[in-house]
Amino acid sequence: HEATVEDVCFHPHSDSEFCSVGDDKRLLFWDERAGREPTLGLPQWSKCDLHCLDWNETDVNLLVTGTADGETFVFDRRKMHAAKGPVGAALHSLHQHKDAVLRVGWLPGSTTHFASGGDDAAIFVWDLSRVGKMISDAEA
């Protein structure tokens, strides 16, 4: 990283792999067995600082990040090699927070549910299986 590292998260099933995000707008993957350079990453792909991330324990290819401008991104690390543009590698870009997202976390055992909390004093629980679907007033 070239600026403050905001969050670090270990791979759920490996004590040698971890990823990090920071104020340099980078999401980087590391493997201490491979040396001091990142093994994979999206250098400066975001338009603002990255504050937090969490690695899914059920599907270790899925990660979620939160940004300084209130966006939440879900990534599949298998698709990051062909990334194009600011959100080219993101499976989902979710914008509901009105301020910085400070914490994200997957529901244990789920590949579709996670929560995000931010500077806007809001907490959102996301269900990726419903992204893009209309929600009735009764469900909201």
Image (cartoon, rainbow, N blue to C red):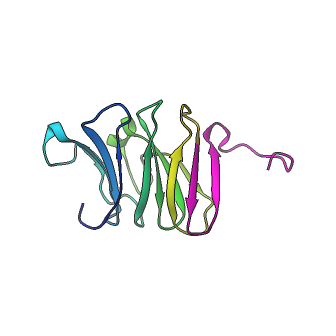
Residue 129 is situated, as x and y percent measured from the top left of the image, at 64, 36
Q: Residue at x 64, y 48 (%)?
A: 125
Residue 50 is situated, as x and y percent measured from the top left of the image, at 41, 61
Q: Which residue extends farthest right?
A: 138
Residue 1 is situated, as x and y percent measured from the top left of the image, at 24, 60
Relative placement, left or right, of 92 versus 61 is right
Compare residues 18 and 38 and report the one nearer the observer.
18
Residue 36 is situated, as x and y percent measured from the top left of the image, at 14, 48
Position above or below: 89 against 2 = above
Figure quadrant of residue 113 = top right
| Magenta stretch, residue numbers | 114-140
Position above or below: 75 against 49 = above
Compare residues 3 and 121 and report the one nearer the observer.
121
Q: Residue at x 15, y 38 (%)?
A: 34
Q: Per the image, is 35 magenta?
A: no
Relative placement, left or right, of 97 versus 46 is right
